[in-house]
């Protein structure tokens, strides 16, 4: 009888009837169905996503195509569903050394659908439906020693016209803004879009963030393209470049990366760990040497400061006075002069109890930035990392990567694995978006992939856009991983900022990064009043818990992060007019608390300090200047 039921269900599915996968809490439903293909045979698999609101399911993703193309054959049309697995319950617990939450736990249901193409070759599509979203990937399960190319996908995410979406036009460094669009087109007619992609379900308080995770050496990274139709965002692989393949090359079996959709309210998205949930567990056990923390950074104020020994010493002294464990010595350290060499600077830092991080060019000829070509091969990395160990250097910042091709994915992973052998921390700059590697390789502290404060050096654009941009990033880029924005600047670089001092202070909390590089010149930090200076001196960079209190992309954000028994809270006004930000304290326990609040004063360059007694039943209304903000620390009364 069971066999008859399975045959019947597969027959109905082949005619267009649907299969479904429900999340454990029954809120998210994924429907997988076959669309008929006329007389030529069976058609193409599609999926759609629904979310239960009150008593009814609401469509958050209309029926969207699935499929993948190999160089030798296609797995898009004329596919036949030949079977499906039983639902498998997923309950995973793990700890992160970085990110928005230390102890992570997720619940999901996994189901795999087995297809055959017209050549009777197998394709599996596995869906995992979690309580906060879903992930799916393609697998070629057969075995073969010969290699083949995966050229493209037919995967599409449908966003109907009028859907509010925040997506950045694609740039290989992911250093772009996330403008609000409703029609899927840009003024420049750009067709390529980078992850993550955020959109709001029409007429509903529901949101979706699309990205990907779990990339291995078998994969390239993908982007989205809507050239054929502005409402259809197709998953697209990088084209061939120089001597690099386009798409991916592998033998069988082969698995794609996980395609990830986080679904729910904005707080569900911001607090989600789904990107690391679907990534592989850590690849090495001993992690006591991994110590996140704050760092003094010379480049923002002095672009060529790292080749000036005396300037580097100023920043080591800044780290000492601000109680920051690290100093980052940026490019051109290999030609350091003016009273000392790199060796002298490292010795000085060690004597002061400050750990050092060094910048490296990944191997491009960008701006002639040195040192170059010290990491390109395993042999060179072994030599360099051995020397770093002898010199007492704790970590590296690797810059100027050259795209999302499979070769680059292998390069990232090779750096992380080789660095871990020598207990070296890693920060990727000019790099691809985080895709869950921080779980697999916990020595990955942070990644740039953001239009950050460094751009005050390059163009005047950020001056007017920073406030709105800063209130968009918590709902886009920073959801998917640590973000090296290099925040908290009170003075000006080449181009001025017009965000308030309290807004800048709040960025330390709002932007999560396991290595938080504070960017300003030493005098700017020394000139702070006592309370904001203490706030930065005692600042943690990893969190036990994160809560979104309030927010809307481009307008404002209020966020709280817990470290031990302390809650750090912050809010940003993304608008050019004054705004009152509401801080609802219902995330606290039932005790009495003290709140040290740092907020806008009468002008943008003043920070007012206030101490308040609070309870979880309170909602504070905090007045913010245009482009203003607030930050503070909540502690339980003894």
Image: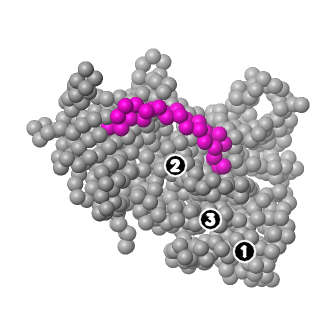
Q: Quadrant of the N terminus?
A: top left
Nearest the camera: 351 or 580? 351
Q: Quadrant of the C terminus?
A: top right
| Disc 3/disc 2 C-alpha distance (Å) | 18 Å
Q: Is residue 234 left or right of residue 621?
A: left
Helix or strand or loop: what does disc 2 sit on?
A: loop
Tell me which secondary structure the magenta stretch mostly adopts: strand
Question: On the image, which quarter does residue 356 sit in?
Answer: bottom right
Q: Which residue is mark 2?
A: 280
Q: Position of residue 228 (x, y in %)?
A: 28, 49
**Disc 3 and disc 1 in contact, CB within 8 angstroms:** no
Circle 1 crowding by C-alpha within 10 Å: few under 14, some 14–19, many from 20: few
Count of number-bearing discs: 3
Helix or strand or loop: what does disc 1 sit on?
A: helix
At 13% across and 37% down in the image, what residue appears? 38
Helix or strand or loop: what does disc 3 sit on?
A: helix
Nearest the camera: 15 or 558? 15
Which span is picked out in magenta? 85-113
Of marks 3 and 2, which one's residue comes earlier in the chain? Answer: 2
| Disc 3/disc 1 C-alpha distance (Å) | 14 Å
Judge whether residue 367 is colored magenta: no
Q: Which residue is mark 3?
A: 421
Q: Is residue 581 left or right of residue 205?
A: right
Of marks 3 and 1, which one's residue comes earlier in the chain? Answer: 1
Residue 390 image label: 1
Q: Position of residue 87 (x, y in %)?
A: 40, 31
Question: On the image, which quarter does residue 50 sit in?
Answer: top left
Q: Residue furthest left?
A: 39
**Disc 3 and disc 2 in contact, CB within 8 angstroms:** no
Judge whether residue 102 is colored magenta: yes
């Amino acid at each position: 009888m069971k066999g008859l039921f399975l045959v019947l269900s597969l027959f109905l599915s082949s005619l267009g009837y649907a299969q479904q996968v429900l999340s454990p809490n029954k809120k998210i439903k994924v429907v997988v169905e076959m669309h008929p293909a006329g007389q030529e045979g069976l058609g193409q698999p599609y999926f759609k996503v629904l979310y239960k609101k009150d008593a009814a399911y609401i469509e958050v993703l209309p029926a969207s195509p699935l499929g993948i193309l190999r160089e030798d054959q296609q797995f898009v049309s004329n596919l036949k569903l030949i079977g499906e697995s039983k639902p498998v319950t997923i309950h995973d617990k793990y700890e992160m050394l970085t990110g928005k939450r230390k102890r992570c736990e997720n619940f999901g249901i996994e189901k795999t659908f087995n297809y055959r193409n017209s050549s009777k070759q197998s394709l599996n599509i596995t869906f995992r439906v979690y309580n906060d979203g879903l992930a799916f990937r393609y697998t070629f399960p057969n075995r073969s020693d010969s290699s083949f190319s995966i050229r493209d996908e037919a995967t599409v995410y449908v966003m109907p016209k009028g859907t509010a979406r925040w997506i950045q036009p694609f740039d290989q460094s992911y250093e772009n803004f996330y403008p609000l669009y409703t029609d899927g087109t840009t003024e420049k007619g750009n067709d390529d879009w980078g992850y993550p992609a955020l959109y709001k379900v029409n007429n509903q308080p529901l949101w979706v963030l699309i990205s990907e995770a779990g990339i291995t050496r078998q994969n390239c990274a993908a982007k989205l393209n809507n050239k054929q139709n502005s409402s259809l965002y197709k998953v697209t692989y990088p084209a061939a470049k120089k001597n690099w393949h386009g798409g991916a090359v592998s033998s069988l079996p082969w698995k794609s990366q996980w395609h990830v959709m986080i679904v729910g309210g904005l707080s569900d998205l911001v607090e989600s760990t789904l990107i690391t949930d679907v990534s592989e567990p850590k690849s090495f056990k001993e992690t006591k040497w991994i110590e996140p923390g704050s760092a003094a950074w010379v480049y923002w104020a002095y672009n060529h400061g790292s080749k000036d020994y005396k300037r580097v010493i100023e920043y080591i002294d800044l780290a000492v006075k601000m109680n920051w464990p690290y100093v980052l010595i940026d490019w051109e350290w290999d030609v350091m002069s003016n009273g000392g060499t790199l060796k002298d600077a490292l010795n000085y830092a060690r004597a002061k109890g400050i750990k050092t991080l060094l910048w490296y060019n990944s191997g491009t000829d960008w701006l002639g930035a040195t040192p170059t070509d010290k990491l390109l091969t395993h042999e060179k990395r072994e030599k360099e990392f051995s020397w770093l160990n002898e010199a007492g250097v704790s970590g590296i910042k690797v810059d100027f990567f050259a795209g999302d091709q499979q070769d680059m994915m292998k390069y990232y992973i090779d750096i992380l694995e080789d660095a871990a052998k020598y207990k070296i921390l890693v920060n990727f700059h000019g790099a691809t978006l985080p895709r869950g590697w921080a779980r697999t390789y916990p020595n990955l502290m942070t990644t740039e992939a953001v239009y950050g404060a460094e751009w005050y050096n390059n163009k005047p654009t950020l001056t007017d856009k920073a406030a709105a941009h800063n209130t968009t990033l918590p709902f886009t880029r920073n959801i998917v991983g640590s973000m090296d924005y290099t925040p908290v600047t009170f003075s000006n670089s080449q181009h001025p900022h017009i965000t308030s001092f309290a807004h800048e202070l709040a960025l330390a909390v709002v932007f999560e990064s396991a290595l938080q590089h504070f960017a300003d010149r030493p005098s700017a930090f020394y000139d702070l009043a006592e309370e904001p200076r203490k706030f930065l001196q005692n600042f943690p960079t990893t969190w036990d818990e994160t809560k979104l209190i309030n927010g809307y992309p481009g307008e404002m954000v209020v966020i709280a992060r817990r470290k031990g028994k302390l809650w750090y809270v912050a809010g940003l006004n993304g608008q050019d007019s004054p705004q009152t930000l509401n801080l609802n304290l219902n995330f606290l326990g039932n005790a009495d608390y003290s709140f040290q609040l740092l907020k806008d004063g009468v002008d943008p360059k003043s920070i007012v300090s206030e101490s308040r007694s609070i309870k979880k039943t309170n909602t504070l209304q905090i007045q913010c200047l245009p482009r203003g903000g607030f930050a503070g620390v909540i502690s339980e009364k003894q």
